[in-house]
Amino acid sequence: MKANEFAEKWTGEQLICYDEAALKDYGLRDSDIAILSKYGLPESAAPYLNFEELDAQEIGYVEKGYCYLGYTGDGDWIGINASSGKILVISHGLDEYADDDFPDDDIQEEAEESEECEDYDYVGFTLVNTSLEALYECMLHYYTFIQKKLTEGTKEYDTSVGKLKEKLMVADPEAMQREDCFWNEEIKKLF
């Protein structure tokens, strides 16, 4: 889904735009900078996603190739990988992990060359979406699902959850192939 389509369809929380100059400092791709600075992200969106802009000095991992976008209901950070544009949940408990668990620049370069390892294969990282466009589409599908206010355990509810999962799979098939991706974990909670 294109960012302008999302902005037109989104009726939830207000969209906040990110500072273009700050995004350039993070080293984001030009296409992601354009989307985040022109269209932004909602202040909050189900399930428990909160977006805000924060100074790079306050979050250490932005120096490692990730740009802070917000946080989850659990207090984990939501970030975007500057080089790939993938959206990730990054555990706020990463300080507890060994340095080897954090994909530093050398590991990232090796992973990109071999294509065997992604940043979400490390401890404390969870793939949300493979792009901002996929994130937009998934948030919109989930928002629409929540608006239906169905009663759990009913046939209509189960059918609606199944349709939601199908829509999320179409929106971001690469992310949804992973059982441990953010959206698959949220679907499990609905049953």
Image (cartoon, grey):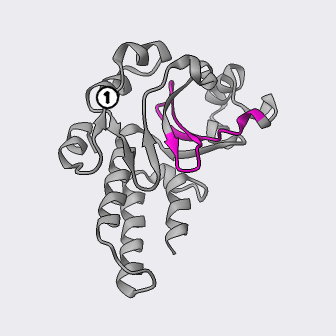
Q: Secondary structure at mark 1?
A: loop
**Does the magenta run of residues contain 83?**
yes
Query: Looking at the rendering, in which quadrant would you find the N terminus?
Result: top left
Q: Which residues are magenta?
A: 71-95
Q: Position of residue 120 (x, y in %)?
A: 63, 41
Nearest the eye: 45 or 79: 45
Whether residue 134 appears in this view of the structure is no
Nearest the eye: 15 or 25: 15
User: Which residue occupies the extreme left position in the image?
Assistant: 8
Q: How many marks?
A: 1
Whether residue 34 appears in this view of the structure is yes
* Whether residue 142 is situated above or below residue 64 in the rendered picture: below
Q: Residue at x 34, y 77 (%)?
A: 150
Q: Residue at x 57, y 55 (%)?
A: 178
* Whether residue 43 is situated above or below residue 177 in the rendered picture: above
User: Which residue occupies the extreme right position in the image?
Assistant: 98
Which image quadrant is residue 97 in?
A: top right
Which residue position holds label 1?
A: 17
Q: Position of residue 177 (x, y in %)?
A: 53, 56
* Other residues around mark 1 within 10 Å, as few (<14) / some (14–19) / many (≥20): some
Instruction: Determine whether, in the image, residue 122 is placed left or right of residue 79.
Output: right
Q: Position of residue 163 (x, y in %)?
A: 36, 70
Instruction: Determine whether, in the image, residue 151 is placed left or right of residue 122.
Output: left
The amino acid beneath tag 1 is Cys
Q: Residue at x 53, y 53 (%)?
A: 182
Which image quadrant is residue 3 in?
A: top left
Q: Residue at x 61, y 56 (%)?
A: 180
Instruction: Determine whether, in the image, residue 180 is placed left or right of residue 31.
Output: right
Q: Position of residue 146 (x, y in %)?
A: 35, 65
Instruction: Determine whether, in the image, residue 96 is placed left or right of residue 28.
Output: right
